[in-house]
Image: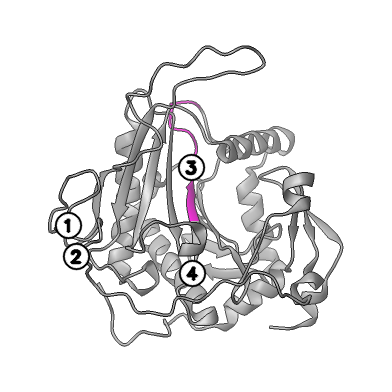
Amino acid sequence: MNSSLDHAAWEERWHPLREEWVIIAAHRQHRPWIGAMVEAQGKELPSYLPDCYLCPGNLRVGGARNPAYTTSYVFENDHPCVGMHAPASIAVSPPYRSQPAHGFARVICYSPQHNLTMAEMSLSAIENIARVWQQQTQDLGNRPTVRHVLCFENKGEIVGVSNPHPHGQVYATNFVFKTIGDELAASQRYSNETGHTLFHDIIEAEQKDGRRLLYEDEYVIAFIPYFARYAYEIYLAPKRRVPHIHSLNDSEIVSLAQALKQITVRYDNLWQMSFPYVMSLHQAPIDGADYRAYHFFIAFHPPLRRPNVQKFLAGPEIGGGNFVSDTLPEAKAAELQAVSTIHYRAKETRV
């Protein structure tokens, strides 16, 4: 889409969850580009690969064999980034500090089919994934050493995924990841200053504006936020404030699955490709403290800003510390609103 919206320039928008300014320079979207390009995936994947360490019945890199699973399957990561047997911290001199990175790392295989992404799954299969997120959050959150549970998915070669088999991961750690800590602090400050819940006010602002909404029903809402940093960044949240996904009821999980389906289908339909993204569940710590100011949501961060062109972090972001968006959230929302919610490859419902 090349509308007048794309030409908005030189504006800063406040990101209340990160408490920082995002620079909007949407006119840069159409500047000449002869830099690096992302090649679209050119080959169809089979439903099963004998050498895929995530497919049913196959041997994994750690030596264990997967069962012949038929829905989703969870196992302990063979190459975890945290572990319960982390070595004691090495003594260092100030100003340096060190501490063990204790925790659990698990892999969630979404489907036994190697070539099936969330966008082409049935609603019941997506509901099942959401319930696995609930189960994993509750199970790992009950471990005495765990302070926080992070569920996420890396989709697409461009974001560094090591295996295209549909899967996500769970990190349950003795520390809280920085983004969550920043959001907690911002939410608490906002509550102290206004008496309101920050994310509830974000939802109300998006509902009043309406231009960036992508899905809404009785229980959940999805939108490109006013302060989006990435071109097609989407927030999906329950309307009821809960700090963790396991607090959602059955009706909310069904709505969450419907929204996940629509979001991922819109992504794929935009350029008729399997759309890459990093998806993460933003949950409060699970250490028993009071987190009433925090509102659970799911964030999608796609790396592409136009077909085959990646959003690179460069001088302003890395050197200057301020994110520069080359696109306008309203224009990108309009593009996604314009595409169908029926997958472009859909011939029949898949499982």
Residue 239 locus on image (x, y percent): 52, 55
Q: Earlier in the sequence, mark 3 or mark 2?
A: 2
Q: Is residue 161 above or below residue 335?
A: above
Report the residue marked by disc 3: 283
Residue under the image location 43 percent in, 85 percent down: 344
Q: State the CA–CA distance, disc 4 to disc 1.
A: 31 Å
Q: Residues within 10 Å of mark 2 (few under 14, many from 20)?
A: few
Q: Earlier in the sequence, mark 1 or mark 2?
A: 2
Q: Along the horizontal axis of the image, is 127 left or right of 302?
A: left
Residue 125 locus on image (x, y percent): 28, 65
User: Which residue is at the front of the view, 282 or 107?
Assistant: 107
Mark seen at residue 50: 2
Q: Which residues are magenta?
A: 279-289
Q: Say which amino acid is labelled 2.
A: Pro
Q: Say which amino acid is labelled 3.
A: Gln
Q: Are marks 1 and 2 in contact (CB under 8 Å)?
A: yes
Mark seen at residue 263: 4
Report the residue marked by disc 1: 58
Tell me the element at label 4: helix
Q: State the CA–CA distance, disc 4 to disc 2.
A: 31 Å
Q: Residues within 10 Å of mark 4 (few under 14, many from 20)?
A: many
Q: Toward which corner of the image does residue 37 lie, by quadrant?
A: bottom right
Q: Say which amino acid is labelled 4.
A: Ile
User: Which residue is at the front of the view, 251 or 228?
Assistant: 228
Residue under the image location 79 percent in, 70 percent down: 28
